Amino acid sequence: MTMVDLSVDLGFIKLKNPVLAASGTFGYGLEFKPFFNLDMIGGFVVKGLYFNPREGNPPPRLVETPSGLINSVGLQGIGVEAFCREILPQLDQLDTAIIANVCGEEEEEYARVAEYLGRFKGLDALELNISCPNVREGGKCPAQDAEATYRTVRKVKQVASLPIITKLSPNVTDIVSVALAAEEAGSEGISLVNTFLAMAIELKTRKPKLGNILGGLSGPAIKPIALRMVWQVAQAVKIPVIGLGGIFTAEDALEFMVAGAAAVQVGTANFIDPEACLKIIEGMKKWAEENGINRLSEITGSLKI
Amino acid sequence: MTMVDLSVDLGFIKLKNPVLAASGTFGYGLEFKPFFNLDMIGGFVVKGLYFNPREGNPPPRLVETPSGLINSVGLQGIGVEAFCREILPQLDQLDTAIIANVCGEEEEEYARVAEYLGRFKGLDALELNISCPNVREGGKCPAQDAEATYRTVRKVKQVASLPIITKLSPNVTDIVSVALAAEEAGSEGISLVNTFLAMAIELKTRKPKLGNILGGLSGPAIKPIALRMVWQVAQAVKIPVIGLGGIFTAEDALEFMVAGAAAVQVGTANFIDPEACLKIIEGMKKWAEENGINRLSEITGSLKI
Amino acid sequence: MIIDRQARIVEKKNWGRYFLFRLKSPEIARSSQPGQFLMIKVSETTSPLLRRPLSLHYRSNQEVEIFFQATGMGTELLSKKKAGETLDILGPLGRGFSLNKEFKGKEVFCVGGGRGIAPLFFLAKELQLLGARPTIFYGGKTSGDLPLRSKLEEAGLEIKISTDDGSTGFRGLVTSLVENELQSQKPAFVYACGPEAMMKKLSEICLKNELSAEFSLESIMGCGIGACWGCVRPFRKNGEIHYLKVCQDGPVFHSREIVWMGE
Amino acid sequence: MIIDRQARIVEKKNWGRYFLFRLKSPEIARSSQPGQFLMIKVSETTSPLLRRPLSLHYRSNQEVEIFFQATGMGTELLSKKKAGETLDILGPLGRGFSLNKEFKGKEVFCVGGGRGIAPLFFLAKELQLLGARPTIFYGGKTSGDLPLRSKLEEAGLEIKISTDDGSTGFRGLVTSLVENELQSQKPAFVYACGPEAMMKKLSEICLKNELSAEFSLESIMGCGIGACWGCVRPFRKNGEIHYLKVCQDGPVFHSREIVWMGE
Ligand SMILES: Cc1cc2nc3c(=O)[nH]c(=O)nc-3n(C[C@H](O)[C@H](O)[C@H](O)COP(=O)(O)OP(=O)(O)OC[C@H]3O[C@@H](n4cnc5c(N)ncnc54)[C@H](O)[C@@H]3O)c2cc1C
Ligand SMILES: Cc1cc2nc3c(=O)[nH]c(=O)nc-3n(C[C@H](O)[C@H](O)[C@H](O)COP(=O)(O)OP(=O)(O)OC[C@H]3O[C@@H](n4cnc5c(N)ncnc54)[C@H](O)[C@@H]3O)c2cc1C
Ligand SMILES: Cc1cc2nc3c(=O)[nH]c(=O)nc-3n(C[C@H](O)[C@H](O)[C@H](O)COP(=O)(O)O)c2cc1C
Ligand SMILES: Cc1cc2nc3c(=O)[nH]c(=O)nc-3n(C[C@H](O)[C@H](O)[C@H](O)COP(=O)(O)O)c2cc1C
Ligand code: FES
Ligand code: FES
């Protein structure tokens, strides 16, 4: 049996395999060091970074739902300075792709964070998180509007020295138009989806279960919708698409690739199994071997209609 | 213990209890006669009706997903004439609310179907299905656009002798704006949500699992998103809101009411348990008794923020 | 149609990936016909969500039997249930095999591939009661796929065995075994259940030999009771092609109506 | 942190809604401290999705014990597992109780309400090894909520019992029992685990009596390993209020840091 080539060339970044850990589900990466050698995975996206430290949303922040999880963490984090000072030097030791997840209260802040991160070594790309439902009133975000998306990406491009992946929100009528706006604004890649705006109620108290009332739904429950969106976007854009949303198994990951994803991200699955990324990579390799596929990247977009 | 009053007055229709069976999941109603006395439930919405009979989409039409079901039935049905001739007279014997689900290829057809149905006795209201993702190319539907919603509802209102419930699609950026458009166009009620546009891929063959490629996701997986939308819409409109999406238990139904629903619909649950509606009603009654609630309708919109 | 939420597993048998449960469910047993099926709840949670359709393998006065292969998450979970536990079952559902009184004294073929044998035991027993002379053709990939062989033999049924690898019985497809047999005798009727490819081939053989046949088809089922329109397949009716519900109009169909996959 | 995917249930005990499992898991046993917890997979499907946090009730050389109450779907499913089956467990996690060598020869109180007794057995045994003199205050609604009473007694631990209904032991809240006891003796330290209201009340009693105390808190956990930021609660640190992770910075916190619910 010949060795399967798992590597993926996204143009702006080469990955040793197509599996990245998703932002907000892999901490700053170091949390997973006790479980496996981080160099084994394609890379990871660190927790969302605002310029300043943030306390995040009031608890409770999690609700388990049927095959899903709602979170309203609200991007609690240490801010970009502490990240570059304390965390990044440790990540720079790793031989895997490190992507920072860039957040902002308004367009200006995205640009400031992106500019600041560009001054340090250790990062391979920036993921623009214009799609977090846990920050603004009513869960609104720039990725819900093609024009706001274009403006934000454009502004960041002007100051960023690193390649940009724009992360889209599924809470839209027409995901393709937002993806096209990001592409036109110069984004080097697209990742989708972020979480679905959701809610849970505690019947006994008649109160929302989340301290923040609304939160974002992730996990296997959303996979069929995320897969549909990845397929639609991959057909429309020319830049590489990174697919995510409910990926728990190697089969899930492979389906996203067949739908058009060049790479995938694994989110909620890391919580249930800290070795999830590793197992998914192993499973993909095994599948490729069994199916006589020498270069895994060949299957991207191979859906037969 | 005093008897709990389960009845609900929607203004345009009185229900003996707030539980309706959802369109497309209860056949023409008669399918459930072997299981229980149909007079026990608040009412039911019959399968979607186009003017003419339809064959529906090619099989496979169903995919099971984590805590969800994707369907691409595509409104196979007998058409409005056969319905009024063969089915409606049987339904007219029942002492429960009967609602017809009105479909159309274009605005004209909605009006034609609504007008035709108004000539017969036996129906209590019409539910305008402007939100089915299984008919048009790419899953598009009028409910994805506030203006198209307004136009369609308006056109139907001009010819309809029965009250109108407009059924919304969750595949939108801003559900509230669509709900407001329906209200402004004269809709007497709003129901939400219809299914989420979704997809599944058979890895072995690299083909879509559904004959129609895309389908609509329903079931417990979508409940947290549906509940959020019902809450948002109920705060914005003055007309009664009927909530649905993944209701499987009495607790689920009660949560939708607390979020603002005046009544609820039960869909996919009917497939897993043909007695689902009945059990949910019983569970709601028990809950009301245990919590000293005399009129169940009091809890509508009682969410404490 | 009866929902029995407390059908107790009286006996459980297991051969590799194949399982047989005997369930106490007097009401369902009483009204069952061969070829009908049950919808079985396999989980108390919402995953897997849907009930699973399984044919009635046998029924006695108080009990029904199911015979199944663990192939995916649902049947896997079901296979872990133990004797003494209860199942939530719904049935009997669908239109079963037609049992023609004229078959009395006549030869009929029952052809089953793999787990497709499930409904044929009940059918063959009823055919015996009718005075017909059923022969069961029982095919599998290898000898391990024929766990019901001794049960069929002990029930005094005429059986013919085939395996793809020749590990037992005729070496080759069960359809070839049927073709061989047709050299020496023509049955009054053919019944079959098994993989789509096997049934399609058999239906061609029946056509060529001018034999009437009924097939029990599979389809992904949302409800099993005719409410979801999810289980349809195309069928020929009065010269036209229409989508019919496998759960309600079938699962047993006459060969001349069936449009085989890939046709 | 170790993932043991094959921790075999060596023994299972059951009293009403309460369950005790003894699990073979040498590596986890070796590195465990009282107050630490495990994250336990309760389902092979995606529903329930998350692992469940359960305290280490005891550990021996090769084995660990968990003691839990079946309250919802997850613990319900867990309670159906049988001896001989295996569990997928992750641990030991979190920061446990602080074991101060200076407690040697001194009286310490361990206060547990309901299932909150779980971590206190392991703790009390370690305190004994240290030469401290632990007294366990074990409170429940009624006598059926005190299933571990005889186990604690047999282990030679000093225990005091209360029930809300007086069906056994002191009639009233376990916190009142502690207050009574404080009339005659002041312990060197107080450890507690139980319902939020009980612990809040106890922390007030400790404040009034100038006692140092540690509490094991509960919180809904996404991961248990510090990766999701989902389990936070507000805590007092250097005069400010911050959200800390219960799974990583706790689950055991000093009473002076804790901001009680509704404060
Ligand atoms: C009328 C009828 C009678 C049947 N009788 C038997 C029987 O007696 N013994 C037996 O072993 N099998 C029988 N089958 C097939 C059996 O229903 C499937 O093997 C089973 O549903 C697979 O479920 P799973 O969760 O193990 O597999 P998964 O692949 O995980 O199932 C996923 C989904 O696809 C459906 N599905 C998958 N394969 C099939 C299939 N071949 N047919 C229908 N639905 C499928 C499942 O019901 C489920 O909704 C019958 C099918 C039908 C339609
Ligand atoms: C560090 C820690 C140690 C614990 N130790 C024990 C123990 O030793 N024995 C014991 O009986 N219980 C213990 N608990 C509580 C136990 O985790 C919950 O009872 C259990 O998670 C409930 O799950 P369920 O599926 O039965 O309930 P459900 O209500 O169906 O659970 C739904 C969700 O809420 C979470 N949840 C519900 N109640 C709690 C709770 N009180 N605390 C944390 N999460 C909750 C569940 O984990 C799940 O994510 C501990 C909790 C924590 C945080
Ligand atoms: C607890 C939690 C925190 C998250 N934080 C972030 C974040 O900081 N930035 C971001 O872009 N996405 C964040 N996400 C979204 C995930 O990266 C991912 O898009 C989403 O969870 C869908 O993938 P999944 O179903 O595999 O989890 C978070 C998700 C969860 C569950
Ligand atoms: C098989 C199937 C067929 C459906 N057909 C219709 C329909 O004809 N008209 C309609 O308005 N909604 C239809 N729906 C949508 C349901 O009425 C409901 O809006 C949706 O399933 C969400 O509710 P649930 O999660 O309770 O199923 C259908 C849903 C399913 C699963
Ligand atoms: S399975 Fe629902 S109609 Fe046949
Ligand atoms: S449970 Fe995930 S950070 Fe604590």
Image (cartoon, coloured by chain):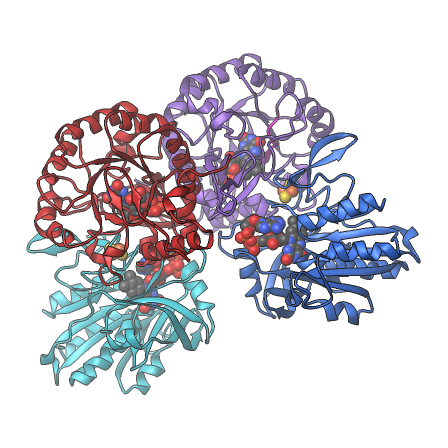
Chain colours: A red, B purple, C blue, D cyan
Q: Is residue B101 above or below residue C194?
A: above
- Residue sitting nearer the eye, C143 or C51: C143
Give the residue at x 83% y 69%. C156
Q: Residue furthest top?
A: B158
One can see residue C32 in this view: no
Residue A251, position as x, y percentages in the image: 43, 50
Quadrant of the drawing holding the C terminus of chain C: top right
Q: Is residue D92 above or below residue D258?
A: below
One can see residue A276 in this view: yes
Rendered image quadrant of residue D30: bottom left
Which region is colored magenta?
Answer: B43-49
Q: Is residue B50 left or right of residue A32?
A: right
Rendered image quadrant of residue A302: top left
Give the residue at x 69% y 32%. B91
Q: Is residue D235 above or below residue B230?
A: below
Q: Residue furthest front?
A: A2
- Residue sitting nearer the eye, C104 or C259: C259
Rendered image quadrant of residue D147: bottom left
Q: Is residue B44 magenta?
A: yes
Residue B142, position as x, y percentages in the image: 47, 22
Give the residue at x 63% y 65%. C19
Q: Is residue B207 above or below residue C162?
A: above
